Image: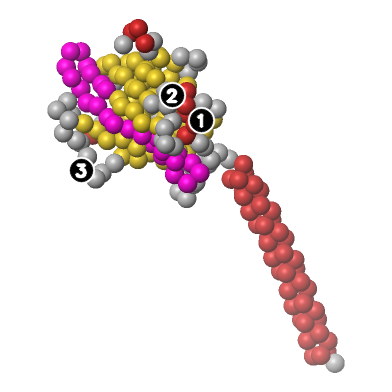
C-alpha cells in the first residue's frame, strides 16, 4: 500500500507539473499571438516607402526608395498635367531647364538641359508613362554631341512609389510642385568614392517672354 500510495503521489505530482507546463505554454502562445497581431497592425499602418532623411547622415531629404515587393500607387498621367511648360532653375552648381509636354497619347514627354557657366553640359530625353495603374519615369542621358551615356536599348527607369498631393515620389527621383509657379526636382546620384548623394533642382515656371 505504501508503494502504491507513493506511486500515486508521484503520479499526482507529475500531473500537476504537466498541467503547470501546459498553462505556461498556453500563456506564452497567447502573448506571442498578441505581439504578432500588434506588430502586423503597426506595419500595415506604416508608410510603405522609406521616410525622408533615411540616411544616417540625413543626406536624403527629398527622395524616397521602394520597399521590396511594393506596388506603385494608382495615379494617372493626367494628374501631372501641371508640369506642362518650361521650368528654369539651379542645381548641381549650374543652371538647368526642364520642358514638359501636356499629356498626349497617355504619356508626358520632355527634355532636360544642364550647363555650368558657359560650358555645355549634358541633356536628357524623358517620358512619364503608365505602368499598370501607376506610373514610371524614364530617361536617357546625352553628351553635348548627342552621344548617349546608356547603351542604345538601355533606359533609366524610376517607378512611382508614393504620391502626396502634388509631390510624386518615384524610386530615387522626386517631382514636387512648390507653390503656383515653383517645382522641386531631386534625384539620387552616384558620386563615386563619395557614395550616393542627392541632387536637388529648384525651378520656377518660365514665362513665354523669358525664353
Is 100 left, or right, of 38 in this rendering? Answer: left
52 or 134: nearer the eye?
134
Distance CA(mark 2)–CA(mark 3): 28 Å
**CB atoms of marks 2 and 3 within 8 Å:** no
* Closer to viewer: mark 1 or mark 3: 1
The local secondary structure at tag 3 comes to: loop
Residue 151 image label = 3
User: Which residue is located at x 37 percent, y 25 percent?
Assistant: 100
Disc 1 crowd, CA 10 A, few/some/many (<14, 14-19, 20+): few
Q: Percent position (x, y) of residue 207? A: 39, 10
Residue closest to the far bottom: 1
Say whether residue 59 is visible.
Answer: no
The prevailing secondary structure element of the residues shown in magenta is: strand
4 or 201: nearer the eye?
201
Residue closest to the far top: 209
Distance CA(mark 2)–CA(mark 1): 9 Å
* Closer to viewer: mark 2 or mark 3: 2
Which stretch is magenta? 113-137
In terms of image quadrants, where is residue 171? top left
In terms of image quadrants, where is residue 95? top left
103 or 25: nearer the eye?
103
**CB atoms of marks 1 and 3 within 8 Å:** no
Q: Percent position (x, y) of residue 211? A: 31, 11
Examine the structure image and report whether residue 114 is included in the region drawn in magenta.
yes
Mark 1 sits on what residue? Answer: 79
Residue 83 image label = 2
Q: Percent position (x, y) of residue 97? A: 31, 19
Residue closest to the far right: 1
Amino acid at each position: 500500500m505504501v508503494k502504491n500510495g507513493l506511486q500515486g503521489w508521484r503520479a499526482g505530482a507529475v500531473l500537476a507539473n504537466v498541467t503547470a507546463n501546459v498553462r505556461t505554454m498556453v500563456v506564452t502562445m497567447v502573448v506571442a499571438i498578441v505581439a504578432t497581431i500588434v506588430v502586423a497592425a503597426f506595419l500595415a499602418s506604416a508608410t510603405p516607402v522609406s521616410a525622408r532623411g533615411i540616411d544616417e547622415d540625413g543626406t536624403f531629404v527629398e527622395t524616397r526608395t521602394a520597399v521590396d515587393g511594393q506596388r506603385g500607387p494608382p495615379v494617372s498621367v493626367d494628374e501631372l498635367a501641371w508640369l506642362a511648360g518650361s521650368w528654369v532653375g539651379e542645381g548641381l552648381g549650374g543652371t538647368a531647364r526642364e520642358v514638359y509636354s501636356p499629356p498626349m497619347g497617355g504619356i508626358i514627354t520632355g527634355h532636360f538641359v544642364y550647363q555650368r557657366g558657359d560650358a555645355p553640359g549634358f541633356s536628357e530625353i524623358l517620358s512619364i508613362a503608365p505602368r499598370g495603374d501607376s506610373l514610371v519615369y524614364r530617361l536617357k542621358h546625352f553628351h553635348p554631341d548627342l552621344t548617349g551615356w546608356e547603351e542604345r536599348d538601355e533606359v533609366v527607369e524610376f517607378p512611382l512609389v508614393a504620391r502626396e498631393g502634388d509631390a510624386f515620389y518615384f524610386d530615387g527621383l522626386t517631382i514636387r510642385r512648390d507653390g503656383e509657379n515653383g517645382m522641386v526636382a531631386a534625384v539620387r546620384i552616384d558620386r563615386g568614392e563619395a557614395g550616393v548623394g542627392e541632387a536637388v533642382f529648384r525651378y520656377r515656371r518660365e514665362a513665354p517672354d523669358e525664353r
